[in-house]
Amino acid sequence: MSNKIHVSSSPHFNLKCNTTMIMGTVLFALLPEIIMGIVLFRWAALIRILISVASCVCFEYIFQKVTKQKVVIGNLSACVTGVMMALVSPPTAPVWIFVVGAAVAMIVAKGLFGGIGSNVFNPALTGRAFMFLSFPAAMGASWLTPKTISAVDAISSATTLSAMKAGTFAVEQGTYWQYFIGNRAGCIGETSTLLILISFAFLALAHIIDWRAPVAMVGTVAICSCITGENVAMALMTGGLMFGATFMVTDYATAPLTKKGRLIFGFGCGLITFLIRRLGGYPEGVMFSILIMNSVAPFLNNLTARKYGYGKKAGRPADAKEVK
Amino acid sequence: MRAKTFKGGIHPKEYKELSNQCPITPAFPASKTVTIPVTMGGAPNQPLVKVGDEVAKGQIIASGEGFMNCPVHSSVSGKVKKIQNCLITGNGMAPCIIIEADDAGRETLLPVLNPFETTKEQALARIKEAGIVGMGGASFPAHVKLNPPADKIIDYVLINAAECEPYLTCDERTMLEQPAKVIDGLAIVMHIINGGKDGQGHAKGIIVLEDNKEYILPALENEIAAAGYADKMSVCLVKTKYPQGAEKFIVSAATGREIPSAKLPADAGCVICNVGSICSISDAFRLGMPLIERSLTISGGAVEKPVNLRVPVGTIVSDLMPSCFTLKSEGASEPVKIISGGPMMGFAMASADFPVAKGTSGVTFLTEKETFLEEESQCISCGSCVAKCAMRLSPALIVRELKAGNIEKAKSFGLMDCIECGCCAFVCPAKVNLIQRIRLGKGIVRQKMAEEKTKAAAKAAAEKAEGGK
Ligand code: SF4
Ligand code: SF4
């Protein structure tokens, strides 16, 4: 026998799945959205995705070097953040803005909070929120219409959500289908409800994400829209709701860990999204709703399941006189 | 029959097929020497023999006065060579009696006793005399377990036949090869639990079997019918899932009850015995045989031909090589971990030079591919551990609070309820050392409790002294 015998504590078995593989799977699940973005917006999308990813990885590397931590960019989590941040941004946003966003995402939102798993706010969304609030003109003034794919040009048109808010939105025949497959103006990766549903199904079936928070969020928006007599299908398919529910609400570190906590978390995100869309000053509320709920998530962790051995089932039932 | 189950838990690869076709074969260590730990379950024993003494097979060689003591017998006829500290399961050193076997064949067994003619006290005395402990790993003395406090009404005697650890198959083989003995043992335990000869108890017997062993079910049911116990014994099929074999989940799957936090199975009206123990109980009455032999599985990817063996207690595992099994030696199939027990809850040992004790249900030799040696990385808060914890605790949050020093908060997330089953660490993608950290946390709590106790005692004593003035 060799001297390679290891003694470490049980269990000596585990799933052959590690952090890098999980992040890799998420990246894989994002592929359809990436491809769709590139198909719709061409170079504009590709360049922004690449810049965003590259700057996120760089900033994480620099931060970990400077703070003398172990460099763990190999776990791909910075890549995921980069891709997500690009996908939730408009294809017309200036390229340099992604570098700024990446710095905020990786250093302020993630690094300073203690790195992977310890951050309170979703880094990609924090980066985007910073871009959005600091440079509103650059981030939301103009949108690209994908219909003119051959010669993509910027138009200063209102988005569906602002149109809906203003009451000037008209549904034509075929609109639903176009929206469903994603042939519409919008952020790089948020347009296609169909593809996002596919990603969701894949991630949920692979047990990478928990269905609870996304379903609760989308369900809440649907129910609220239904009650207030809005166009439910449009409420679900426009803006970043589907993307946010699939990829942002399920972000590990910034959502609660417990099942009950996740349900409430999703419900809160849905409700706030609805309220902002309807009453707030912004056409879209997904980003802020998730960031607001992120700050509540640590408290929602207290909503744990009933532990074994507590409550009604524990012990010998008082009426168990004779067993049959 | 629909298989019952519990919430949470995991499905590790089982690897039962490596050894479940291998009949239990008697084996004897090549060195003709056994190393018997002085204490195997219960309170610490004192050796009753000296170096140079001749001992008979079945002779008591160590024991103690207390209720919690459980005697230890010589498993061979031979001569005491040494009494010294040796490596035992758990990687500690503990006093062991080393006996070299001779060919004299001296044997002192107990007189055969008809279990159904005895009172409860007589039967319990016999079980203690025979040195019977739980043979699934925890080694709790059987005479204590089978004597629950009088105010606890016992409704069920459950046989833990789940054997949910991967690789291990010795219980499976025992039930297949000796179903009659299992049923007889169960009947004896029920007789004791129901109060002995003139007892009033009404407890029923249930054999809790995982459905990967469903093929044994007909044999067990036939045996129950043949022995005429059909009205008070049954077999309950449960889903194959880890940690089904933990006491708590045996109770909840079979009866729908839960053992209250920090309480015993008796508080849920149940008594649980392992398959190995139940057979030794039968042997202790029918053959007068103390617990000096046990069956175990030797398996794992690094073992050339996995086997089920029946060996004298005290057999040094490496003494069974190469006569009973051999290890692979080329590169990737070399063992990197030697585990006393199964891979989920067993102890990693530094070498195979440790004795088979009463609670050793198997030895697993894992290759690098089977086990994992990755270093811990930062928790990514994925929640898998929370989703899979069989006790429905929140392991990641317990550990997070422990790190922050919030012991009370950690307790509220279930620190003290953890059964250390390992489901959480099994699924953790970041390989966080969850169990080690939880164990440390429990240690801190226990230490604190002990300190408070002594403080309170000191205070009480001081007050008494004050009052006496
Ligand atoms: S926390 Fe304890 S009881 Fe829960 S899975 Fe982990 S080891 Fe098992
Ligand atoms: S499974 Fe591991 S990484 Fe995931 S929450 Fe639990 S401890 Fe953290």
Image: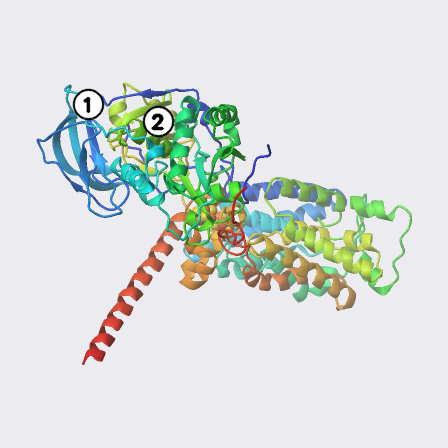
Rendered image: mark on residue B43: none
Q: Residue furthest right?
A: A173
Q: Residue furthest bottom?
A: B469
Q: Position of residue A134 (x, y in %)?
A: 65, 66
Q: CA distance from mark 2 to mark 1?
A: 24 Å
Classify residue A245 as left or right of residue A183.
Answer: left
Identity of the residue drawn at 20% across and 39% down: B38
Q: Position of residue A104 (x, y in %)?
A: 57, 60
Give the quarter of the figure containing the C terminus of chain B.
bottom left
Q: Chain of mark 2?
A: B
Residue B431 visible in rendering: no
The relative height of residue A290 versus residue B274 in the rendered view (above or below) is below
- The chain under label 1 reads B
- Per the image, the residue denoted by label 1 is B31
SS class, disc 1: loop
Mark 2 Cβ inside 8 Å of ligand 1: no
Q: Which residue: 51% across, 29% down?
A: B212
In the image, residue A309 sits, relative to residue B100, either above or below, namely: below
Nearest to N terminus: mark 2 or mark 1: 1
Q: Name the residue beneath numbered marker 2.
A: B334
**2 vs 1, front mark:** 1
In the displayed orientation, state which residue is furthest to the front: B198
Q: Determine whether the residue tagged by mark 2 lies in a helix, strand or loop.
A: loop
